[in-house]
């Protein structure tokens, strides 16, 4: 059974049109992450939630926002998508933040296309 | 600068042949080391990890990796690959007890029948 679920699998949006990607988890993990992965590149951390505490990476553009209304769900909002935002977006969870000890669980990702 | 390097972008091997994927890191101390696999259309899955102790680590799906401090390397190996091993493989490190995980750029593995 899928433990980290991302919807939709593929998302097409228009340049400048707001888009929301969703992630849900059945693991009851405290930490939820959003990664951006472009072709042939390493996954890049955008931000993470530790419970309700939001942690933004310093180089994440303001165009990217996130919401976590409860433990199970986390959303990625792209306010005005540009062509450079086309990528795979991966959601991940972990029980705690110490990734030296904790295991990351990834969803299957949402492939975003921007027309 | 701290980094994780996977020097091979693509690797092609024949089914049944042995495999070695390279990973080098540059950190002051021995970091925590991981290998993840990403099958087409899927998220990343942990194959194995090294924290301390025995430098040869066994993982899932018949993979193993060896930590070599002198070479700052953590290479992934499999004695005989299967067609289902075709995927992208990411080496990753967590520097000391930091809460961040740093991924390499990945190596895409192709399997010839």
Image: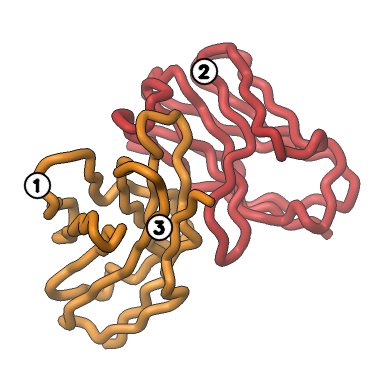
Residue B61: percent from left, percent from top? 18, 57
- Would residue B96 be found to the left or right of residue A69 on screen? left
Q: Is residue A46 above or below residue B106?
A: above
- Count of numbered circles in the view: 3
Secondary structure category for the residue under label 2: strand
Q: Colour of chain B?
A: orange
Residue B54 numbered tag: 1
> Residue shown at 21%/73% (left/top)?
B82
Q: From the top left corner, tell me how far across and down residue A115 is, in percent.
A: 83, 60
Quadrant of the image occupied by residue B73: bottom left
Q: Is residue A107 left or right of residue A101?
A: right
Chain A, chosen colour in render: red
Q: Using the numbered discs, state the Cα–Cα distance from disc 3 to disc 1 in whole angstroms.
A: 21 Å
- Helix, strand or loop under label 3: strand
Q: Name the image quarter holding residue B53.
A: top left
Q: Which label is found at residue A50?
A: 2
Are the residues tagged 1 and 2 within 8 Å (C-beta)?
Answer: no
Quarter holding the N terminus of chain A? top left
For mark 1, give the secondary structure.
loop
Question: Could you tell me residue A51's position as x and y percent?
Answer: 52, 13
Q: Look at mark 3 in the image and give the residue it sits on.
A: B90
Subunit ID for the residue under disc 3: B
Verify CB contact (< 8 Å) between mark 3 and mark 1.
Answer: no
What residue lies at 75% left-to-right and 35% top-to-bottom? A64
Residue at point 78% right, 57% down? A84
Q: Which label sits on residue A55?
A: none
Q: Residues within 10 Å of mark 2 (few under 14, many from 20)?
A: some
Above-or-below relation of A48 to B42: above
Does residue B109 sit above or below A13 in this rendering? below
């Amino acid at each position: 059974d899928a433990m980290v679920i991302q919807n939709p699998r593929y998302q097409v949006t228009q340049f400048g049109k707001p888009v929301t990607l969703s992630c849900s988890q059945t693991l009851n993990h405290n930490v939820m992450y959003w990664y951006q992965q472009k072709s042939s590149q390493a996954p890049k951390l955008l931000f993470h939630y530790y419970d309700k505490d939001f942690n933004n990476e310093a180089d994440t553009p303001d165009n990217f926002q996130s919401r976590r209304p409860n433990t199970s769900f986390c959303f990625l909002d792209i306010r005005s998508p540009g062509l450079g935002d086309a990528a795979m977006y991966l959601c991940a969870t972990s029980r705690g933040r110490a990734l030296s000890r904790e295991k990351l669980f990834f969803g299957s990702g949402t492939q975003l296309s921007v027309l | 600068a701290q980094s994780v390097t996977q020097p091979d972008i693509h690797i092609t091997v024949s089914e049944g042949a042995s495999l070695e994927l390279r990973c080098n890191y540059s950190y002051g101390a021995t970091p925590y080391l991981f290998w993840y696999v990403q099958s087409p259309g899927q998220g990343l899955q942990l194959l194995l990890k090294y924290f301390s102790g025995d430098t040869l680590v066994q993982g899932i799906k018949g993979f193993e990796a060896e930590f070599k401090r002198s070479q700052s390397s953590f290479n992934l190996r499999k004695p005989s690959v299967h067609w289902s091993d075709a995927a992208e493989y990411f080496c990753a490190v967590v520097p000391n007890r930091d809460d961040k995980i740093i991924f390499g750029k990945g190596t895409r593995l192709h399997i010839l029948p």
